[in-house]
Image: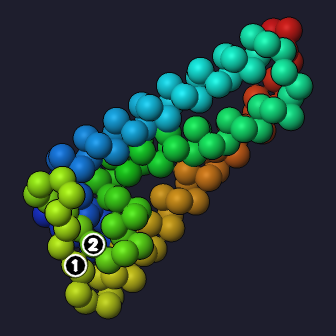
Amino acid sequence: MPSPDQYIPGVCNIGPAEIRRRMVSGWVGLTATLALAGTLFYFENPPIWRLLLFFPAFTAATGFLQGLYHFCLGFGRKGLFNFGEVGKTDTVTQAEFRAADQKKAMKILVESAIVGVGVAVGTYFMPADY
């Protein structure tokens, strides 16, 4: 696991304060996913509505993965990093470092989308009368 106290291109671009923020967003997304799923099943909505679970599940996965990887995908795409006060960023100036960060950001985005699709499609096929 990367050290959360220094920038490592393509590996770690956020420190402890930013990591906490990403984990909180993961928990919020998970809570929203469970609440929406519970609501959809409780009111016996048609299965097609369960595909909406993609959005909060994607949000949850994005938050948790960023926290676990110590890497903000938004910062990675923009060429930024932050190991200090939340809201203040530094710029990545070397092109090869920016490329490594953009690759890692895309990996997190794809993994989050896979989780979102998996949750949405998985619940789509769940019987309502479990």
Image quadrant where residue 35 sits? top right
Displayed quadrant of residue 36: top right
Horizontally, residue 77 falls left or right of residue 109, namely left
Where residue 42 appears, x then y in whole percent?
75, 11
Callouts 1 and 2 close, C-beta under 8 Å = yes
What's the CA distance linking mark 1 and mark 2? 5 Å
Q: Amino acid at mark 1?
A: Thr
* Element type at mark 2: strand
Where 99 sits versus 77, above or below? below
Q: Earlier in the sequence, mark 1 or mark 2?
A: 2
x, y (%) of residue 96? 32, 88
Please name the residue that numbered disc 2 is placed on.
80
Identify the residue at horizontal 41%, vertical 62% (top origin).
Answer: 73
Classify mark 2: residues with Cα within 10 Å, few (<14), some (14-19) or many (20+).
many
Category of crowding for the residue at label 1, using alpha-carbon neighbours closer than 10 angstroms: few (below 14), some (14–19), many (at least 20): few
Q: Residue pushed farthest bottom?
A: 95
Can you tell which mark lies on residue 91? Answer: 1
Q: Describe the colour scheme in one phrase.
A: rainbow
Q: Is residue 8 left or right of residue 27?
A: left
Q: Tell me the quarter of the image containing the C terminus.
A: top right
Residue 20 pos. (x, y %): 25, 41
Q: Amino acid at mark 2?
A: Leu
User: Which residue is located at x 18 percent, y 53 percent?
Assistant: 86
Residue 126 lies in quadrant? top right
In the image, is 97 to the left or to the right of 48? Answer: left
The front one of 75 and 118 is 75
Rendered residue at 38%/51% (across/down): 66
